[in-house]
Image (cartoon, rainbow, N blue to C red):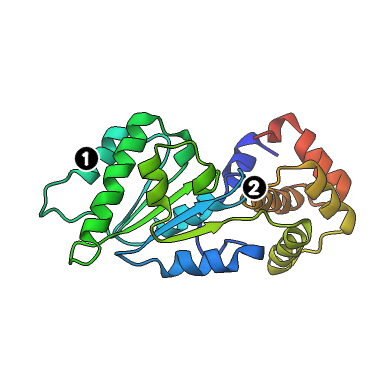
Amino acid sequence: MSRQLLLDVLPASAPTFENYIAGPNAAALAAARALAPGHALYLWGAPGCGRSHLLRAIASGPDARYLGPADSAQTLRELAEAPAGARLPRCLAVDDLHLMDPAGQSALFALYNRWRESAATARAFALAVAGDRAPLAMPLREDLRTRLGWDLVFRIDPLSDADKRAALNAQAAARGLQLAPEVLNWILTRYERDMRRLAALLDALDRYSLAERRPITLPLLRAMLADPDSTP
């Protein structure tokens, strides 16, 4: 199997509400789906819990914008200080608050103020923010910490192994595949815990099985991951 074939498969699919596995986070998913202009949402949880997935899903709709660590504080500042009559995107999603430097925190503080000032006007927009800790535990300037709790706040809990097992089995069944228990056990104990990457691995395994004309077994999975030409 060529390196290119696996690279074509392994990148995780675009985050959407439909491919988000809610598990214990059904209320957070419902709030993210329903987020409307004039409302704000803060999501927090450990790395790999799915908060960024939800934030990107929120920003995937029309007239929405996702801002992550690669975006500068100046970008946030320009949005917060746009001319009074300017209309911002209908939804702004700001990820990885915990990585922001003081300039970024200051710009996000200004953006929260802009959000509140416009909330009851025709220029209202939704604001979704995500970080790795609850507002009270976040090492931020106090005025920004207060603003994180102005509207809805949800903790995103990691999926249990049972949730991941059920999700992988469902995705395999949708492809007409049957995963042996030992294959699932190996994936869940030895591979990345992020659900999107687990789903991408299943995609790669399906393609590899077809290319090799072999059923999906634990030796096939190990062969795929050990093959230097199939290493992502």
Question: How far across and down, in percent of the image, does residue 221 sit?
Answer: 81, 45
Quarter of the view holding residue 215 = bottom right
Alpha-carbon distance for marks 1 and 2?
Answer: 34 Å
What residue type is disc 1 on? Glu
Which residue, given by chain and number where applicable, does mark 1 sit on? 78
Say which mark, if any, is on residue 197.
Answer: 2
Mark closer to the observer (1, 2): 1
Percent x, y of residue 72: 33, 33
Q: Position of residue 212 (x, y in %)?
A: 78, 47
Residue that appears at 39% across and 37% down: 141
Which of disc 2 and disc 1 is earlier in sequence? 1
Q: Residue at x 51, y 70 (%)?
A: 30
User: Image point 77% across, 56% down: which residue?
Assistant: 161
Quarter-of-image position of residue 133: top right
Q: Quadrant of the C terminus?
A: top right
Mark 1 crowdedness (10 Å alpha carbons): few <14, some 14-19, many ≥20: few
Tell me: 128 left or right of 180: left
The residue furthest front is 142
